[in-house]
Amino acid sequence: MFAADKASRGLGVELLEQGEGTAVLRMTVTPGMVNGHGIAHGGYVFLLADSAFACACNSHGPVTVAAGADVTFVAPAYEGDVLVARAGERTRFGRSGLYDVSVLRGDEVIAEFRGRSRTIGSTSASASTTSKESR
């Protein structure tokens, strides 16, 4: 799934590790990711966490999407910072799941993210695209 994620890969996000229900991604804050306050725009921090969540919840096989997510920004990140997002599954029930993601700069927590997933049933992104095109 990550290989086809043009948004994340286009921003330099790297997949470091993936296991069943887990993922670790890395991103360097670039000059274009900094807001008017001189800190990383929260949308980019959210994107990194959301991408780690997506990799973790899709590790089981069937296409799984976000049903919702919340983020708490704990500390600012700055241009040049290397951020690492560590995602872990907390539970799955039926077609739903809960995942927590910590975004870190070294050992410092930058943000905490909780994602709620929903499996949509097909087993590949191309099958999902095909079904949309046939509607």
Image (cartoon, helix red, strand yellow):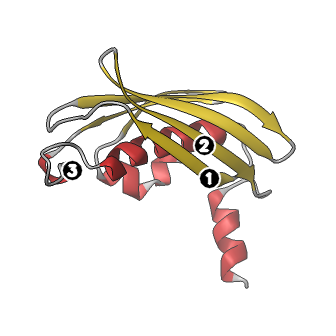
Q: Which dot, 1 or 3, sits closer to the camera?
A: 1
Q: Which residue is drawn at 12% across and 48% down?
A: 31
Mark 1: amino acid: Gly
Decide which of 51, 15 is in the foreground and name it: 51
Q: Is residue 14 above or below residue 5?
A: above
Query: Which numbered circle lies on residue 115?
Result: 2
Q: Are marks 2 and 1 in contact (CB under 8 Å)?
A: yes
- Please rate how many residues cluster around mark 2, counting C-alpha atoms within 10 Å: few if below 14, some from 14 to 19, many from 20: many
Instruction: Locate residue 37, reporting x and y percent.
Output: 14, 48
| SS under mark 2 | strand
Query: Which numbered circle lies on residue 33?
Result: 3
Decide which of 96, 110 is in the foreground and name it: 110
Instruction: Locate residue 35, reporting x and y percent.
Output: 18, 52
Q: Which residue is drawn at 41% across and 48% down?
A: 47
Asked if residue 132 lies left or right of residue 71, the reply is: right
Mark 2: amino acid: Gly
Answer with the quarter of the image where residue 114 lies: top right
| SS under mark 1 | strand
Residues at marks 3 and 2, CA–CA distance in whole angstroms: 23 Å
Which residue does the numbered mark 1 point to in the structure image?
68
